[in-house]
Amino acid sequence: MAVMTSRDRVLRLLAREPVDTMPCFSGQGMVTLPAIETLGIRFPRVHLTAENMANSAIRSMEMFDFDSAVVPYDMCTIPEALGLGVSIYEEAEEILFPTIPEKWGTPEEVRIPSDYPQRGRMPLVSQAISLLKEKIGGTHAIGTWILGPFTLAGQLVELDILMKMAIKARTKVEALLDKLVDLIIDLGRHYREIGADYVNLREMGTGADILSPRMFELIVQPRLRKIFESWDSPKILHICGSTDLIIELMNDCGAEAISVDHKNTLSETRSKIGSEVLLLGDYDGFNLPGQASFEEIEQAVRRCIESGVDAVWPGCDIWPEIKSENLKAINSAIKELGRSPSPAVGRI
Amino acid sequence: MGKKELREELLKALSDGVVNFEEEKVKETAQKVLDEGLNAYDAVMNGLAAGMEIVGDLYDKHEYFVPELLMCADALYGGLDILRPHIKMEDLDQRLKGQVVIGTVQGDVHDIGKNLIKMMFEVAGFTVHDLGRDVPLEKFAEEQMRTDSEIVALSAMMTTTMMGMKKVVQMIKEKNPNVAIMLGGAPVTKDVTDLFGADGYAESAGNAVQEAIKMISRLREMQK
């Protein structure tokens, strides 16, 4: 085979086909401040135009030798399109991601307008994916993500109300989740059609530090299954926080790749899920790129690989305020230490 | 039934009601405590708080999770709202006197952990100044100065908002290094706490409750 492109490397890994070395990529936001600064824009502006979104993703990818670019960066695009307000923090000096200031009071109040893909910043995300396809689609993988139904519901309805209703009035919560499942299926298909090579389903509000495994099995797992049954491969499920207690349930949702963060016990996870499933994780996206020494970086990457991941990737969004030399060192260590086969993926 | 037996029965009913998240039962029992002329502060500390202590253990053992904690918290508040106005002045002398400023930092609208720890501070007798959520960073320092609170408790559920806490710690410690600052939230670790110069942390709503329960347990022990 000729020289493997970044795109080949990511797609082959996600298809469990041999690669030359481990790709450096992510299914979460990985926009960086050093990249944004070279574009001459302020952080809040990266969320507001398709060009800023795509260009900041490409610049971050190029500066740090990632094999993919990922958009969008914030969790508010869908809630905003459904009719909720959004705080962008345009004047803030600190890095603040957009938030939803006021949510609906109950699940029954949530309405999904049929034209939601044309509302709010939804068109920007689609345009950004198309721009990525146009600019880097021949060489690099294009990633995107969508919140899982329970986590998305928590962006629409006050989380404490949602959680209590999951016990007291489960059918009302499930009715909302079902509506969101349909939305998520359609949106994931749409993103793939316009150029995304992979969609990461981020159901981060359902870890065992929040919901019981029983509740996960009862109201979350069936809906994740339905989503993955409806999507084409590759299928990635990400849950952060405490996942040791639910890893087998996660593995039974129909995803081909499971992504976890540093609170997961990777080696135990690998032995529980076997070597057929792709395991992605789990470096600390704040500490490693922003605080750690080079020695700690190499140790962390080595630990992930020795614990059985198929790709070392961040367990959450990479905190934008990285040290450039750290992120370069992380990706360099991944490529260097990732030359040997991983449990689910061989090497050329 | 003697007064002692009645007290024990009602305290147990309050505790069980919190554990089993039976809000109405807790309210009825709290009212009965008042009707029978029993001590309201005793009922809060040895009924409601004792129940929450069991809840904390259940969370630790992975038998209860955040939705259950929230249900228990509702039950506790049901009783607390009835009992608190009837706590006597002489009991106030025994109470842990203190003030705490609490809030979720700017950029973060998740307030479950913050509300749970607030509840535990209230149970313990603190005066709580709740700034709410998505709070501009300088507001924490201003409120601490205004109220002369001994504790400031900051919450951030996401890595993306955690950095704001560092600034708050700096602002407060510069002016008053004796203020105890607690950090809470999923991304918070001991390393982060040390790095930011804070004094304590809890990484989840459950841990926050556990930390507060330890504090209340010590208080209850001291009062025995």
Image (spheres, rainbow, N blue to C red):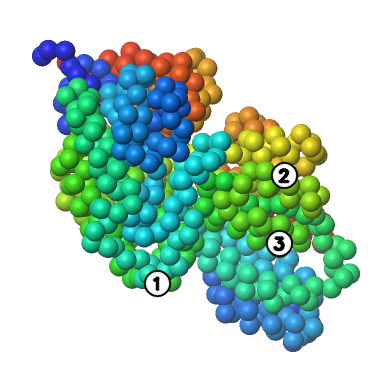
Query: Of residues B173 and A93, which is closer to you in this image?
Result: A93
Q: Are marks 2 and 1 in contact (CB under 8 Å)?
A: no
Q: Secondary structure at mark 1?
A: loop
| Quadrant holding the N terminus of chain A | top left
- Classify A114 as above or below A187: below
Circle 3: residue type: Glu
Question: Which dot marks residue A78?
Answer: none
Q: Is residue A228 visible?
A: yes
Parent chain of label 3: B
Q: Is residue B161 visible?
A: no
Circle 1: residue type: Ala
Parent chain of label 2: B
Q: CA distance from mark 2 to mark 1?
A: 41 Å
Parent chain of label 1: A
Residue at 68% across / 73% down in the picture?
A: B81
Q: Within 10 Å of the Cα at label 3, are there few (<14), some (14-19), or many (20+) other Cα atoms?
A: some
Residue at 73% across / 50% down in the picture?
A: B143
Q: Within 10 Å of the Cα at label 1, are there few (<14), some (14-19), or many (20+) other Cα atoms?
A: few
- Identify residue for label 3: B122
Question: Which dot marks residue B141?
Answer: 2
Q: CA distance from mark 1 to mark 3?
A: 29 Å
Looking at the picture, do discs 1 and 3 lie on one chain?
no
Q: Secondary structure at mark 3?
A: helix
Location of residue A20 by image quarter: top left
Q: Which comes sooner in the sequence, label 2 or label 3?
A: 3
Q: Secondary structure at mark 2?
A: helix
Query: Of residues A35 and A50, which is closer to you in this image?
Result: A50
Question: Which dot marks residue A169?
Answer: 1
- Classify A168 as above or below A30: below
- Classify B120 as above or below A75: below
Query: Of residues A291 and B143, which is closer to you in this image?
Result: B143
